[in-house]
Amino acid sequence: MPSMLDAVVVGAGPNGLTAAVELARRGFAVEVFEARETVGGGARTEELTLPGFLHDPCSAVHPLGVGSPVFKTMPLDRYGLEWLHPELPMAHPFDDGTAAVLSRSVAETAASFGPRDAGAYRRLVTPFLGRWDTLARDFMSLPLTALPRDPVTLARFGLTGLPPSTWLMKRFRDDRARALFAGLVAHVIAPLDGLATGAVGLMFALAAHEGGWPLPRGGSQSISDALAGYLRDLGGVVHTGFEVKRLDDLPPARAYIFDTSPTAAARIAGLGRAYDGYRYGASVFKIDYALDGPVPWTAQEPRVAGTVQIGPSSREIGTALRQAAGGRAPGTPFLIGAQPSLVDPSRAPRGKHAFWTYGHVPHGWDGDLTEAVERQIERFAPGFGDRVLARATAGPAELFARNANYVGGDIACGAASGLQLLLRPKISAFPYTTSHPAVYLCSSATPPGPGVHGMSGHNAAKAVWRRLRRG
């Protein structure tokens, strides 16, 4: 080991590993320290229920992973990452036994909304089609880290997406389109009337049309393992089972990059009360199921969809989000479900299936949402309970125990509402830097925020390598 490393990364989630890779492939000496025995952060895979059933404790479906500007520059397929695409990226069932869909095809998606809204949806997405690579890079970078490649499209996207999603949904006359779009916004656990929530929903929709909503073969762990394998081949070192409690625990380095919550970074690096004003948001109650067969959806479309949004109206979804954000557990939760074994037989024994779902609950909530979740699933898949072989539940406390970035069970590592959706973890043109000149943040508490895309790690690494080269 050199007498002084160029950089040390604390936390081996996708952002920490991406930051390490970005520095290592520019010739810097980098080591990563991870408290858990395996790398992964929010992208792990474990046997949570029964032997042979492989579940993702957090993220499962990765529209922003397959479309990530930084992942596209890495040969991750050489390290075992293979994207599997379900027949439909997402389906959204309704009480009448039908479903709207988010398909790779804009025409199929628009048709599922009905004739009154098909044209409105096509007009919404058409200006951005075929421009994903530049739009994603521009949207997921900061102006001070990279000049926009297509400023006109980015400006148009901003005008459409910066207002609340409730404004954008006024384009639709029927609730089928509004409900599906509300569900897209709910993926960041934000109330529908928040600033820039329209951009969130639109980004997820465009991701489906451009690159799909795929699942990685073998589970989300394969993304983390591919990043770690690439890093090792570049000369980087990964230490697991090493909990960092203070900066002195780490070897000397020119830069320390934290893939942690701002709270943890402040505690470890001695930053005082630098992030006392940072808000953590609502949590989720997550259930992983081992099933004796596929989920018996009434509608046909969810039977072939990788992701299923379970909440039949925009009003019901909005109410559930408001209740969770306001401190009440929803009696009728909005659910997001994933069906990995539909496209990846390795995830469950032959003839069996793994199913993943969560509903929103208040920050730090200590109740049990299982009954409400299963009542909601049965509403659209009668007989679901008869197929359950085993379940593993995780509320806010369990989520935080598994991943210290999930403060109070907040899987977004910070409330994605108000200005904090855009300006996190503080109002600053340089959100990756801290008051300590050698300490940086690269977790999803920094722009562009939650999701397995590595762009927070890439953006932070860029700030680090510019400083190291100057030094």
Image (cartoon, rainbow, N blue to C red):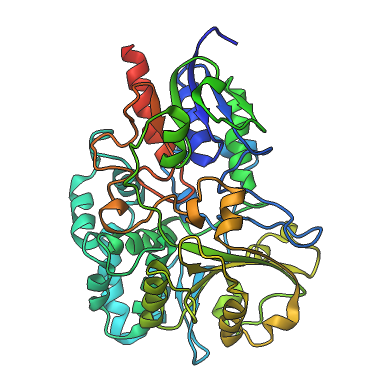
Residue 404 placement, left or right of 44:
left
| Residue 110 showing in the rendered view | no
Quarter holding residue 127: bottom left
Q: Quadrant of the N terminus?
A: top right
Identify which residue, 292 or 42, lies in the foreground: 42
**Place of residue 87 in the rendered image (x, y in percent of width and height, measured from the top left):** 57, 68
- Count of all numbered marks drawn on residues in the image: 0
| Residue 13 showing in the rendered view | yes
Vertical side of 67 occupied by 228: above or below:
above
Quarter holding residue 230: top right
**Place of residue 117 in the rendered image (x, y in percent of width and height, measured from the top left):** 30, 81
**Place of residue 17 in the rendered image (x, y in percent of width and height, measured from the top left):** 53, 34
**Place of residue 348 in the rendered image (x, y in percent of width and height, measured from the top left):** 75, 62
Residue with the most extreme front position: 272
Residue 217 placement, left or right of 452:
right
Identify which residue, 6 or 275, lies in the foreground: 275
